[in-house]
Image (cartoon, rainbow, N blue to C red):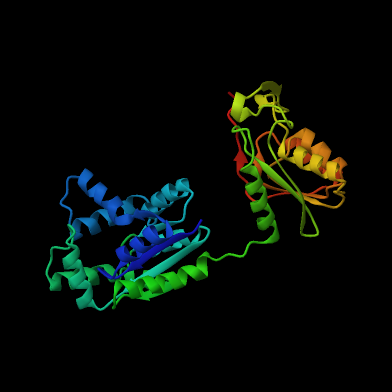
Amino acid sequence: MITIGITGTLGAGKGTIVDYLVKSRGFEHYSVRAFITEEIKRRGLPVNRDSMTQVGNDLRASHTPSWIVEQLYEQAQASGRNCVIESVRTPGEVTALRGKPSFYLFAVDAPSATRYERAVLRGSETDHIDYDTFIANERREMESDDPNKQNLKVCIEQADFRFDNGGSIEELNRQVEEVLKKIMYHRPSWDEYFMELADTAAKRATCDRGRSGCVIVKDRQLLVTGYVGSPSGLPHCDEVGHLFHKTINPDGTISNHCVRTVHAEQNAICQAARRGISLDGATLYCRMTPCRTCAMLIINCGIKRVVCERKYHAGAESEELFRQAGIPIEFFHDEVQQYDNQ
């Protein structure tokens, strides 16, 4: 997931870049301006540039310099989509977002007269001002020694990419698209590539309780695939429902496992056996820590490496089996996958 923060001078075109990212690239939009506006209304203050600055600085001073953008970032993370956070205005906000994965800061500028004309045409609640007031407002927000207050000058200087919006919207959009081509193109590693194939195999799964897939690879060549589903010719969970079996986990907790299906790892190993394919020295990719039964099969068929997207909450026993067998198990993410036990 990519996160783009946008800073820039007043009326430079931050909203124009947001429109392009949302409409042309499917980004989710989160606005510091809208966040502060809601707080202004809650406090019963007039919505203007003075209250926008006052309340924004107050929120940052009451919490942390980055508090507002961190609230928006948490919302963005919950969406799981590429997102754009509009109106990054303090160095503290930039510092906080720099610590997030795949973050880029965009800055946009244009001649002051052009920006004022655009602000007047925009006609928002904070734009009903004359040119001198417009320039005075910008000067007030350009520099500050207080990390809780706005400092557009430093934010713009720290931007990864800067855009000149002195021309047409089409010209600005072309600039943005050129940058997007650079940052959004990512050639996957071999592990990422094969994990994506495992995720694709999972789309064939027929149990909505855990649609997982598996691929087994050797020398960077795909050998077999597998996904969760009932034995051949038997009804699937998606058709007739789950068949639960209650088990006691090593930590004493009780889980309800669906026993109608064959796990993705088991199906992949069965496919190899039917086709006479040796799995000695192979690598297995799957969504989460294999269960104990799958782990034992993996060990016995000669697989020498296991790569999982995330951990399974009851996977400690399997991890110990792999450790004893000398088989490394690696995880893309440290997060633990939980299943509803109902």
Quadrant assignment, res 255: top right
Quadrant assignment, res 61: bottom left
Does the rendering let one see residue 240? yes
> In the picture provided, is 271 more to the left or to the right than 136?
right
- Taking the view exactly as shown, the residue that stands out farthest to the front is 233
x, y percentage for residue 225?
A: 73, 46
Q: How many marks?
A: 0
212 to 60, vertically: above or below: above
> In the picture provided, is 130 more to the left or to the right than 75?
left
x, y percentage for residue 334?
A: 63, 46
Task: Between residue 191 and residue 101, name the one nearer to us.
Answer: 191
Does the rendering let one see residue 324? no
The residue depicted at 58 percent of the width and 29 percent of the height is: 340
Task: Between residue 299 and residue 107, name the one nearer to us.
Answer: 299
> In the picture provided, is 8 more to the left or to the right than 284?
left
Task: Between residue 290 and residue 155, name the one nearer to us.
Answer: 290
Task: Between residue 127 and residue 173, name the one nearer to us.
Answer: 173
